[in-house]
Amino acid sequence: MSTGVFQIDQESYVPNAQSAALSLVAAVNEKLGELGQQPMEDPVKGPHVCEGRTGLDHIGSASLRKLGELAGEERAHVHLLALNPYRLVYAPRSFERPQVTRHREDLAGQTVNVLLGSSLHLRDELLGLAPDLGIPLEGGVLGDEVAKKIDDLEPLHEGESDWDLVEGTRVAWLILHEAALLSIERDVPISLAG
């Protein structure tokens, strides 16, 4: 199964499911209010993740789940991917622990609550995970050349032969990294929909 990475919640729903999109936005804003955070604005049309340094906006759900598992529970916002790589929201707000919203959706025959993470913590945790994935950073940030190699599915190190890492986990890392940067810069949520 493939999961789409969107920069706003309403666009992550098909046109005839906009009431569900509005319900999700309301539930996220309710949870942010409980945390003393400003509500999210969810513009009808917003930036697209492909405006970052990747041409991709979908990734295999298994690659997202693996990235979340590699992060472990100590990187709680990335770890959300291990719990549910199909429907998550990351808000451009800072809060320590991921949250459970009241919004529920049917996924793979189960009704689950949508989880809420912070795109600021997502960015920081992804950068902390980069060395474990063999992703070199320049002064603590991802350089354009390395981003292009990941996006082009090229190995980052000579003799690299773990194609699941090269074509799956690193690509998932890049898509989420770029989405987090855009989320923070433009003050819009990230919505994963699978």
Image: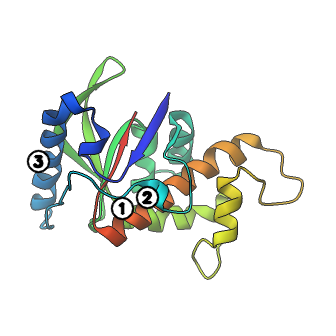
Pointers 2 and 1 in contact (C-beta within 8 Å): yes
Judging by the rendered image, the residue that carries numbered circle 2 is 179
Q: What amino acid type is highlighted by mark number 3?
A: Ala
Q: Is residue 163 toward the left or the right of residue 19 in the image?
A: right
| Residue at (32, 17) in percent of width and height | 109
Q: Residue furthest bottom?
A: 139
Q: Is residue 110 above or below residue 119?
A: above
- Answer above or below: position of 36 versus 74: below
Quadrant assignment for the C terminus: top left
Mark 3 Cα within 10 Å, few/some/many (few <14, many 20+)?
A: some
Q: Position of residue 146 (x, y in %)?
A: 69, 66
Residue at mark 2 to residue at mark 1: CA–CA distance: 8 Å
The reply, left or right, for residue 31 in relation to residue 96 is left
Q: Which residue has dot 1 on it?
A: 119
Q: Amino acid at mark 1?
A: Ser
Q: For the residues marked 1 and 3, what is the alpha-carbon distance in whole angstroms?
A: 18 Å
Q: Residue furthest right?
A: 159
Find residue 148 and report its image quarter: bottom right
Q: Quadrant of residue 42?
A: bottom left
Asked if residue 42 lies left or right of residue 83, the reply is left
Q: Earlier in the sequence, mark 2 or mark 3?
A: 3
Q: Looking at the image, can residue 136 be seen?
A: no
Q: Amino acid at mark 2?
A: Ala
Q: Is residue 102 above or below residue 152?
A: above
Crowdedness near tag 2: few (<14), some (14–19) or many (≥20) residues, C-alpha within 10 Å: many
Q: Position of residue 105 (x, y in %)?
A: 24, 29
Residue at the disc numbered 3: 26
| Residue under the image location 75 percent in, 42 percent down | 163
Are discs 1 and 3 less than 8 Å apart at CB? Answer: no
Mark 2 or mark 1: name the one nearer the start of the chain. 1
